[in-house]
Image (cartoon, rainbow, N blue to C red):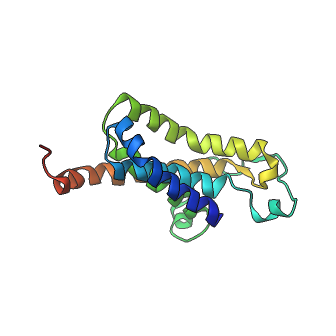
């Protein structure tokens, strides 16, 4: 992952969180987490890899060798699979913390579509040097689901911490 892309993701999250928070009727913190979640995914998946920087592009073929979720044993170790799952957890947490509005429903659909869009871009834009893999879609969706569960469980705690609004 490019450090510069990660810095840009953080800066965008900080700078736009107030406006996005107002639009989504949520706190600036939740908006920042949401923006960071999308930015983190983009920084990790849509920036050219090291080989692409030397002129090597991907083959433009999608790997369908795993269609389904990874075995639990594989998820319990630090590897590409577990990192692909972890990548989407912050986004899932942020989506779960959004108020139940039409705009939040649109954001939820966008979050679910993101793994598919990322793999499509990686397939088509061969200059990124990244490979399209169906396994990544399943791993990303699992991470999103884990984040949604964590965020849903955290909602009452955050409501209690923030106290009554008046």
Residue 45, image x and y in percent? 65, 54
Outermost residue toward the right?
Answer: 55
Tell me if residue 21 can be seen: yes
Which residue sits furthest bottom? 77
**x%, y% of residue 130?**
75, 54
> x, y percentage for residue 81?
59, 61
Count every numbered label the image shows and give the total: 0
Give whichever of 68, 42 is nearer the camera: 42
* In the image, residue 84 above or below residue 134: below
On the rendered structure, is 107 left or right of 149? Answer: right
Q: Is residue 23 left or right of residue 129?
A: left
Q: Residue at x 60, y 51 (%)?
A: 42
Q: Is residue 30 left or right of residue 162?
A: right
Q: At 77% from the left edge and 65% from the top edge, which residue is drawn?
A: 50
Task: Please determine whether, in this image, residue 79 is positioned above or below residue 151.
Answer: below
Query: Horizontal placement of 138 versus 122: left or right?
Result: left
Residue 27 at x, y percent in the picture:
31, 47
Asked which quadrant contains residue 2, the reply is bottom right
Q: Is residue 22 above or below residue 122?
A: above
Identify which residue is drawn at 46% across, 47% down.
Answer: 16
Q: Quadrant of the N terminus?
A: bottom right
């Amino acid at each position: 992952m490019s450090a510069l892309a990660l810095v840009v993701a953080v800066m965008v999250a900080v700078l736009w969180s107030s406006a996005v928070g107002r639009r989504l009727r949520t706190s600036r913190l939740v908006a920042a987490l949401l923006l960071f979640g999308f930015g983190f995914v983009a920084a990790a998946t849509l920036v050219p890899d090291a080989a692409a920087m030397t002129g090597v592009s991907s083959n433009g073929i999608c790997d369908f060798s795993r269609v389904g979720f990874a075995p639990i044993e594989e998820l319990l170790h630090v590897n590409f699979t577990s990192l692909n799952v972890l990548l989407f957890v912050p986004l899932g947490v942020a989506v779960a913390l959004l108020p139940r509005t039409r705009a939040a429903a649109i954001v939820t659909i966008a979050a679910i579509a993101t793994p598919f869009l990322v793999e499509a871009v990686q397939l088509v834009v061969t200059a990124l040097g990244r490979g399209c893999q169906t396994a990544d879609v399943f791993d990303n969706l699992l991470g999103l689901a884990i984040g949604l569960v964590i965020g849903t469980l955290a909602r009452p705690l955050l409501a209690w911490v923030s106290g009554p609004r008046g």
